[in-house]
């Protein structure tokens, strides 16, 4: 990331723990943001949420691990539950409305030996809830990848490098 910043003349600011690096792109008249250009080159920029996917390219194992970590950090859920016998367990889930993206996530997990399940949540709300007076209605089914078996969770914990503290500690 630092090399990328140096190449494009970006400002770099690190969070004191050193785990997060923030880039600031300088404004240059007539030049586009280099990250936007990269996303355009791969055909991802400007896609609607239900059209998101990852380009079909040969990518390294480290890339896939980082990609999965980023997805769980941003749109994932790590839960912890205690059953009536006192056993602690809980699933890790990733949700999206993109059927192709959810299949790519499932495939990437399988490549790491992490068993998972894909399910579809059809949220048909006739009398949906409202936020600040605006009715919230889900139009697309939610695609969910769920990892809930203990052996799969142990493997997943060895693959992911989560940056969000509470998710990392729960996993």
Image (tube, grey):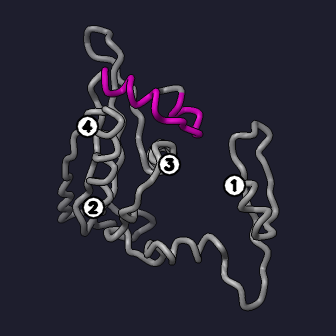
Q: How far apart are marks 1 and 3 (CA)?
A: 13 Å
In the rendered structure, are the residues bearing label 4 and label 2 in contact, judged by CB atoms less than 8 Å apart?
A: no
Q: Mark 2 points at which residue?
A: 100
Q: Which of marks 4 and 3 is nearer the N terminus?
A: 3
In the rendered structure, are the residues bearing label 1 and label 4 in contact, judged by CB atoms less than 8 Å apart?
A: no
Q: Is residue 91 left or right of residue 58?
A: left
Q: Is residue 130 above or below residue 170?
A: below
Q: Distance between the residues labelled 3 and 2?
A: 19 Å
Q: Is residue 110 above or below residue 120?
A: above
Q: Mark 1 points at which residue?
A: 1
Residue 168, given in percent of the width and then of the height, sits at 53, 31
Q: Quadrant of residue 141?
A: bottom left
For residue 116, the mark is: 4
Q: Name the residue under label 3.
A: 63
Q: Residue at the spot x=77%, y=89% of the render?
A: 29
Magenta stretch in the rendered image: 151-168
Q: Callout 1: few (<14), some (14-19), or many (20+) C-alpha neighbours within 10 Å?
A: few
Residue 36, given in percent of the width and then of the height, sits at 59, 74
């Amino acid at each position: 990331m630092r090399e990328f910043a140096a190449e494009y003349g970006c400002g770099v600011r690190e969070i004191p723990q050193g785990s997060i690096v923030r880039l600031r792109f300088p404004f240059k008249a007539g030049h586009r943001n280099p990250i936007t250009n990269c996303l355009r080159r791969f055909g991802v920029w400007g896609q609607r949420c239900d059209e998101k996917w990852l380009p079909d390219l040969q990518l390294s194992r480290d890339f896939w691990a980082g990609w999965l970590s980023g997805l769980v950090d941003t749109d994932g859920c790590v839960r912890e539950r205690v059953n009536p016998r006192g056993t602690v367990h809980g699933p890790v889930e990733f949700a999206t409305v993109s059927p192709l993206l959810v299949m790519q996530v499932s495939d990437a997990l399988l490549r790491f030996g992490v068993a998972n399940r894909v399910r579809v949540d059809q949220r048909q709300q006739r009398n949906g809830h409202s936020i600040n007076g605006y009715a919230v209605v889900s139009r697309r089914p939610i695609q969910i990848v769920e990892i809930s078996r203990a052996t799969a969770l142990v493997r997943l914990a060895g693959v992911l490098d989560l940056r969000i503290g509470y998710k990392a500690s729960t996993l």
